[in-house]
Image (tube, rainbow, N blue to C red):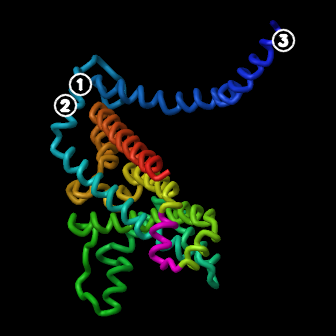
Amino acid sequence: MNRARAPANGKIGRASAPYLLILPSILFAFWIIGYPIYDMANMSVHAVNRFGKTAAFNDFANYQRLFSHQLFIGCLIRTLVWTVFVVGGTVLLSVPIALILNEKFFGRTLARIIIMLPWAVSLTMTGIVWRWSLNGQFGMVNATLREFGLQDTPIEWLATSTAAFPILIAIGILVSIPFTVTVILGGLSSLQADVFEAARIDGATAWQRFRYLTLPLIRPFLNIVLVLNFIYVFNSFPLIWVMTQGDPANSTDILVTWLYKLAFRYGELGIASALSIVMFVILLALTITYAALAMRNERSTA
């Protein structure tokens, strides 16, 4: 009987070994991520002074003040517009760039390096350079336009909401391209060339090869860049803060920059905590929804 049970016990041990090995990492990650979320959720339902000390339970008053705040809806809409346009524009530009860089041509290595170089520069430094370039008095953009005779009077690019927010979106797309191109290029490099050669011999056009072969095969990589870029851009703080600090008149504020103002400029830590939880819930819900839709599409096409 003991001999019969030994193999079964051995199988159970081998099956559970991977889980036991990763258990410390899971517990550590859960503590690193879970405790701040718990602490933030606790602060969001209590009265909090500007030094972060919690008092009595306030019956969700922080959430009521947040949802009734005059800036909340505007910041939420701008955050969604900012995220959708930056992520969408990044993917639309990165796919053709990656396709070009995947082809064999003279100077391809140099071109790849040039595309990826901006990734090595911090967003804070990028924001400083662009803010200097767009300065209305001595900025490089106005100087260039004046040099070519395209305009005589200087333009304050970041002084009006109608110009500042679209400019921020365009710069957000530019700084997101290197990472996205890198991921898509990695996906393209893993594809089998024989499949495309057979399609070319069968008479498939370049568009047909892209639509029916390339796009479905790199879809997992597109899912990765969509989810990661959505999270990064939704929480993108340095670029907007360095360039405009949410001005003029909060017209370029998104949720994360307004959160910073609430917490560290106005001392409203209770409302800031409630906003953090709301942002976490929005990101979690959208990520789970997109992941579920992507998995359903994969199962339907399998």
The residue range painted magenta reads 203-215
Using the image, determine if residue 286 lies above or below residue 141: above
Tell me how far mark 3 sits from mark 1, CA to CA: 61 Å
Image coordinates for residue 57, horizontal then vertical, percent: 27, 18
Quick one: which residue is furthest to the bottom in this view? 149
Image coordinates for residue 218, horizontal then vertical, percent: 52, 61
Q: Secondary structure at mark 2?
A: helix
Identify the mark nearer the N-term, 3 or 2.
3
Which residue is rendered at x = 23% and y = 60% of the image?
248
Which residue is rendered at x = 24% and y = 21% of the image?
58
Is residue 208 highlighted in magenta?
A: yes
**Callout 1: 10 Å neighbours few (<14), some, many (20+)?**
some
Contact between marks 1 and 2 (CB within 8 A): the answer is yes
Please state which amino acid type lies under the numbered disc 3.
Arg
Contact between marks 3 and 1 (CB within 8 A): the answer is no
**Callout 3: 10 Å neighbours few (<14), some, many (20+)?**
few
Q: Which residue is mark 2?
A: 64
Q: Is residue 247 left or right of residue 188?
A: left
Image coordinates for residue 60, horizontal then vertical, percent: 23, 25
Q: Nearer the viewer, residue 200 or 51?
A: 200
Q: Secondary structure at mark 1?
A: loop
Q: Which mark is residue 3?
A: 3
Q: Which mark is residue 164?
A: none
Tell me how far mark 3 sits from mark 2, CA to CA: 66 Å
Mark 3 or mark 1, which is nearer to you? 3
Which residue is rendered at x = 49% and y = 53% of the image?
224
Q: Which residue is mark 1?
A: 60
Is residue 55 highlighted in magenta?
A: no
Please state which amino acid type lies under the numbered disc 2.
Gln
